Image (cartoon, helix red, strand yellow):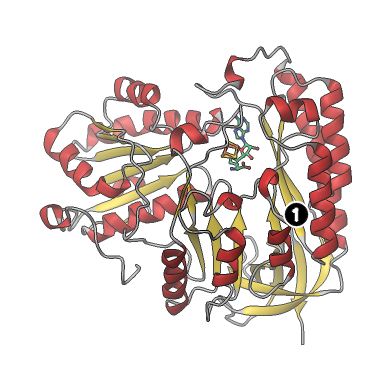
Amino acid sequence: MDSDTEYIAGMDQISRSGEGKRYHLITFGCQMNEHDSEIMAGILENIGFEAVADLSEADLIVINTCAVRKKPEEKVGGLLGKLKPLKEQKRDLVIAVGGCMTQQAELAQYIKQRFSHVNLIFGTHSLTHFPQLLEEAIIKGGTVVDLEENQDLREGLPIRRTDRYKAWLPIIYGCNNFCSYCVVPYVRGRERSRPLEDIVNEAHSLAREGYLELTLLGQNVNSYGQDRPETYDFADLLLELDKVDGISRIRFMTSHPKDLSPRLIETVARGGKICEHFHLPVQSGSNRILEVMNRRYTREHYLDLIRDIKLQIPGVAVTSDIIVGFPGETEYDYLDTMQLLEAARFDNAFTFIYSPRRGTKAAEMTDHEPRAQKERRLQKLSEIQQRISLDLNRELVDLVVEVLVEGRSKSNPVMLSGRTRTNKLVHFPSTLELTGRLVPVKICEARTWNLIGEEAG
Ligand code: SAH
Ligand code: SF4
């Protein structure tokens, strides 16, 4: 728990209302959602709740939802269905559903009607008054719905962090880009950057608590600062954070290719604590599709960026996201994406089949391509990517890399597991307790998804 972030609005009236009760929290979606869940857990523990691993032992179940594609939404529906008998057995069980899915009024209404055993439905902006909402749901009965929008930066909320050495650090909330397929700007609001001093102060307190690695979070970290009256930008923030004693690694995600500046590449190239990794989603290799997606860059611009990044930052890793089956995507567009994959040589790429999202522009476009065709394209793309990932990993064999050890490998307890500065997963045998240490490891074997090594002298 952050020692200097104990304040919650209205805490005096609702303090310790969770005393003696247990909560179970389930999170879907991205890193920002994982961090929001850390805040929910922090708030709940601050009012007396204790975490419990077994769902059936919980007095309160909180589900933090994701709306970026249909699949996570379906999973939430399935989960809520399964919770009904539990609620029937245990009348005073409280079920709360929040996050990006419920921020959409139609979906909130749907959940309220379809799953009447849910007590509280809240959106992404409701964290600041989460305890009051819970209290209201418990007292009132029925289903409380709170989708109030605000521009809060959520400063000063308590955080119960999941990791001991790696911490999420949000720097900018929301998104202004309105890519035509994406629901995020509708459920997360407009871009709001946190003041630089607040981020740097949080980094110092994390360093004091023993955290070694920070991951700066934002839908588009490159827009950091643009909405603020001050004149600093993302590169300035990185340079400030690089000075924080005690922190060894600084990561960031996600970068939007349209505003990745030469200065940012230079800043990462300087090294220091800033890790040599860019997550730079390209989405498509076809200029025609990029335009309809409203991405505001071309494949040529993107490939120039990759070239500059690789030239200026030796050993850099670049990862990406790709959508296949966007409305109107032809075989030619798809071939352009395949070629881009070969040209960019990503260390890894996350590939998704396009999923229409309510309220977005793309959802109104005609989409004739059969599902089987999209699945075939996805399959082929991931095969190509797997070959490239393995090739790039093979280049690391015999090199010594720095690994931040996260603990014992779940599948093989003889091995320790951790990540390189480029975010690659490494396993190496050791009997020593090295969790939370930065260890030099010599790579002996390359696999598609991870590397095997041995401790280097
Ligand atoms: N802000 C980040 C991405 C956030 S969403 C960025 O701009 O890159 C994470 C990824 O989900 C996206 O990069 C995209 O590849 C995928 N995605 C978003 N909306 C989608 C949709 N409607 N269907 C399929 N994939 C989608
Ligand atoms: Fe969605 Fe585009 Fe914003 Fe990323 S930049 S969150 S893909 S709208």
**Taking 152 as reference, is 169 left or right?**
right
The image position of residue 442, as x and y in percent, is 79, 76
Asked if one can make out residue 410 in the rendered structure from this viewpoint, the answer is: no
Viewer-side residue, 69 vs 11: 11
Residue drawn at 25 percent across, 47 percent down: 129
Asked if one can make out residue 199 in the rendered structure from this viewpoint, the answer is: yes
Q: Height in image: 375 above or below 302?
A: above
Graded by Cα atoms within 10 Å as few (under 14), some (14 to 19) or many (20 or more), the crowding at tag 1 reads: many
Q: Height in image: 159 above or below 400?
A: above
Viewer-side residue, 290 vs 133: 290
- Asked if disc 1 is less than 8 Å from ligand 1, the answer is no
The quadrant where ligand 1 appears is top right
The image position of residue 359, as x and y in percent, is 50, 21
Q: Quadrant of residue 4?
A: bottom left
Q: In which quadrant is the N terminus drawn?
A: bottom left
Q: Amino acid at mark 1?
A: Val
Q: Height in image: 409 above or below 174?
A: below
Extreme-bottom residue of the structure? 457
Numbered circles on residues, count: 1
Residue drawn at 81 percent across, 51 percent down: 306
Q: In which quadrant is the C terminus drawn?
A: bottom right
Viewer-side residue, 57 vs 351: 351
Q: Secondary structure at mark 1?
A: strand
| Residue assigned mark 1 | 318
Q: Quadrant of residue 400?
A: bottom right
Residue drawn at 74 percent across, 24 percent down: 374
The image position of residue 22, as x and y in percent, is 26, 53
Residue drawn at 41 percent across, 74 percent down: 205
The image position of residue 187, as x and y in percent, is 44, 34
**Taking 286 as reference, is 356 left or right?**
left
